[in-house]
Image (tube, rainbow, N blue to C red):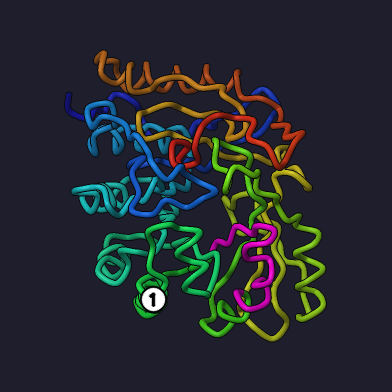
């Protein structure tokens, strides 16, 4: 079915039942990944059949409807989005959508040596790159299949092509990489890019050697950073995600802390997720969702899909509650959630 022009570009706002305006949507291009990070996926995974995954044309159509509903920022996620066959066409199509202010990508960095320049040329303005350790052996242990040198080369390439913003994302795990907080920050500082430290999310059965991983709180990370750097509180950028930011004095490097456990950020939530199979996921920490794919493939018009999205916002919960941060509470792997 061709894209419809039936929905006018009115800038209508998406407002949920708690008065939060949705301006940011994360679209998962695939649930597949070339890494098997321990906090994200099981070592042996069964991925979605390809026919159940949204086509590139369906992804672009969903994106266009959201933008017509007032969304200003799109982030393409996965799995690893850059391994999706033909995904370059998606980036090219998205960057030409009227009303889109920011097109971002989250990646594990494995493909950036070859793909960074094309992403920039396609209109991608910012990029988040996962990097949990600078130690090759630890990197292999955490990712199971990744090569640190490949990712570091990809980061350098991304810096060289001139994205507006680059941020490293590090999930800090007690006993695995909590001794590298300063080293990772100094690495970001040396490249003049940003870094965010993320508390582990209790999603999916992703434990190491049968023992639940223990998250490191943002307060502990901040204390470690404040002992080594002079930090200045910063306001978040427009259409930002959940990070709280500090700038390292005398530099352009900002440090973000993302704290789903210790500093609940739900009151300012401005985002939705669309999973690879087309589920509109209303909250990362809950199962509230509707299937956009089913309605897309039933031949519904843009206006009908827009109405379904508006109606779905009534199901968006006020907040998530993670009572046991060291035990999975949503049996859904992060790769299936769209990052």
Q: Is residue 155 left or right of residue 254?
A: left
111 or 59: nearer the viewer: 111
Residue 299 picture location, percent across and down:
24, 15
Residue at 55% x, 64% y is 132
- Work out which quarter of the rendered image holds the N terminus and state it: top left
Tell me the SS state at disc 1.
helix
Residue at 61% x, 62% y is 196
- Height in image: 320 above or below 31? above
Residue annotated with mark 1: 149
Residue at 43% x, 47% y is 74
Q: Is residue 59 left or right of residue 214?
A: left
Residue 218 picture location, percent across and down:
75, 57
57 or 286: nearer the viewer: 286
Residue range highlighted in magenta: 169-184
Q: Is residue 18 left or right of residue 124?
A: right
How many numbered dots are placed on residues in this image?
Answer: 1
- Height in image: 326 above or below 295? below
Examine the image and state in which quarter residue 49 appears: top left
Residue 303 picture location, percent across and down:
36, 20
- Height in image: 167 above or below 21? below
Residue at 46% x, 44% y is 41
131 or 175: nearer the viewer: 175
**Is residue 172 one of those drawn in magenta?**
yes
Neighbours of disc 1 within 10 Å: few (<14), some (14-19), many (20+)? some
């Amino acid at each position: 079915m061709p894209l419809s022009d039936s929905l006018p570009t009115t800038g209508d706002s998406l407002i949920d039942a708690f008065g939060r305006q949705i301006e940011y949507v994360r679209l998962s291009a695939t649930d597949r990944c070339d890494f098997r990070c321990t906090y994200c996926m099981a070592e042996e995974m069964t991925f979605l059949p390809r026919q159940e995954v949204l086509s590139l044309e369906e992804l672009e159509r969903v994106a266009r409807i959201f933008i017509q509903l007032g969304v200003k920022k799109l982030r393409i996620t996965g799995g690893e989005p850059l391994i999706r066959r033909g995904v370059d066409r998606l980036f090219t199509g998205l960057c030409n959508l009227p009303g889109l202010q920011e097109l971002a990508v989250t990646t594990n960095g494995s493909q950036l040596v070859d793909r960074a320049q094309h992403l920039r040329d396609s209109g991608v303005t910012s990029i988040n790159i996962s990097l949990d350790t600078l130690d090759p052996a630890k990197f292999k242990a955490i990712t199971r299949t990744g090569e640190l040198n490949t990712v570091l080369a990809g980061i350098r390439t991304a810096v060289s092509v001139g994205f507006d913003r680059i941020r490293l994302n590090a999930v800090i795990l007690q006993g695995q990489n909590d001794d590298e907080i300063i080293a990772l920050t100094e690495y970001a500082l040396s490249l003049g890019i940003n870094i965010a430290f993320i508390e582990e999310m209790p999603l999916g059965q992703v434990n190491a050697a049968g023992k639940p991983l223990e998250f490191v709180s943002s307060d502990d990370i901040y204390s470690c950073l404040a002992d080594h750097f002079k930090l200045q509180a910063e306001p978040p950028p427009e259409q930002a995600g959940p990070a709280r930011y500090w700038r390292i004095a005398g530099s352009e490097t900002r440090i973000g802390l993302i704290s789903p456990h210790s500093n609940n950020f739900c009151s300012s939530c401005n985002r939705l997720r669309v999973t690879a199979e087309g589920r509109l996921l209303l909250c990362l920490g809950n199962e509230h969702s509707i299937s956009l794919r089913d309605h897309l493939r039933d031949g519904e018009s843009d206006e009908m899909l827009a109405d379904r999205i508006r109606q779905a916002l009534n199901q968006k919960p006020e907040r998530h509650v993670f009572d046991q941060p060291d035990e999975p509470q949503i049996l859904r792997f992060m790769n299936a959630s769209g990052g």
